[in-house]
Image: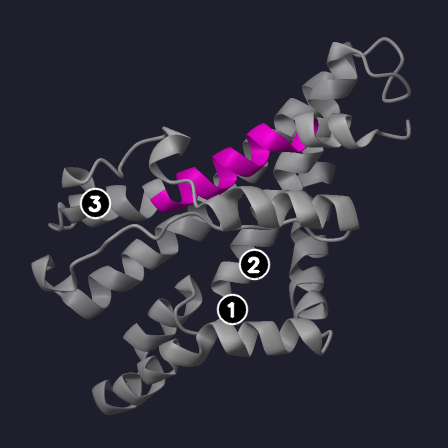
Amino acid sequence: MIELTLMQKIAIWTLPVLMAITLHEAAHGWVASKLGDKTAQMLGRVTINPLKHIDPIGTLLVPIVLLILGGFVFGWAKAVPITPRNFKNPVRDMAWVAVAGPLSNLLMAIGWAMIAKFGYMVSVDGADSMSVGAFLTYSGLAGVAINLVLMVLNLIPIPPLDGSRVLSALLPNALAYRYNQLESYGLFILLGLLLLGVLGPIISGPYQAIQGVLLNMVGL
């Protein structure tokens, strides 16, 4: 493995990060439109055009800073607007909309794993020089990483993360109402877990397990 410069890292991670974040949000909007809520579609958010989803801080600044500092790279896009009252069954349908985001990340992770394998196969020198094959290998591995981190992170049942929508659908109405009131504090809870060093271990266990399965599946 070669030592990558900062510019090489940015070049390798840019497309995987943009795709992971924007397609995650587009998937929410697409499923919502299929279930009766056309809000995101009318606002042009059911698209793979990253310009429609980019959040300057979450999509650009945060991933670049984390890339420089090392460790997990993640970010976020502008949330897709959803109008639950347009659904026939708001609670159930919101859960399906929520699941669509992490599921899109899993599918993208599988695709990036295949790209990484292809890059390794066509690289003359394996991953020891920055050939086109090596670039594809590194980009594929970056795509696997960012998508799995986003998938696992969003499945944590802390409102307003996607996992909380699924859990809310399974709770009795009164308890779900009280649980969803935590949404105002969700960001602070996540920041607290991050500062306490708890968020990393919560993500890393499932992340490493799923990553191992995907890379073994493609023979890496």
- Residue 13, located in which quarter of the rendered image? top right
Predominant secondary structure, magenta span: helix
Mark 1 → mark 2, Cα distance in angstroms: 7 Å
Q: x, y (%) of residue 105?
A: 49, 44
Q: In this view, does 159 lie above or below 25?
A: below
Q: In this view, does 196 lie above or below 41?
A: below
Q: Earlier in the sequence, mark 1 or mark 3?
A: 3
Crowd class of label 1 (few under 14; some 14 to 19; many from 20; radius 10 Å): some
Q: Is residue 5 left or right of residue 135?
A: right
Q: Mark 2 points at which residue?
A: 152
Which callout, 1 or 3, points to the residue nearer the camera? 3
Q: Is residue 41 magenta?
A: no
Q: In which quarter of the image is the N terminus?
A: top right
Residue at 90%, 30% in the rendered image: 3
Crowd class of label 3 (few under 14; some 14 to 19; many from 20; radius 10 Å): many
- Residue range corresponding to the magenta coloring: 12-25
Residue at 40%, 73% in the rendered image: 159
Q: Is residue 20 magenta?
A: yes
Mark 2 → mark 3, Cα distance in angstroms: 24 Å
Callout 3, which amino acid?
Ala
Q: Is mark 1 on a helix, strand or loop?
A: loop
Q: In this view, does 113 lie to the left or right of 94?
A: right
Is the Cβ of the residue at disc 1 closer than 8 Å to that at disc 2? yes
Mark 1 → mark 3, Cα distance in angstroms: 24 Å
Q: Is residue 25 above or below residue 134?
A: below
Q: Which of marks 2 and 3 is nearer the N terminus?
A: 3
Q: In this view, does 58 lie to the left or right of 216?
A: left
Q: Name the residue under label 1.
A: 156
Callout 1, which amino acid?
Ile
Q: Name the residue under label 3.
A: 40
Q: Is residue 82 left or right of residue 54?
A: left
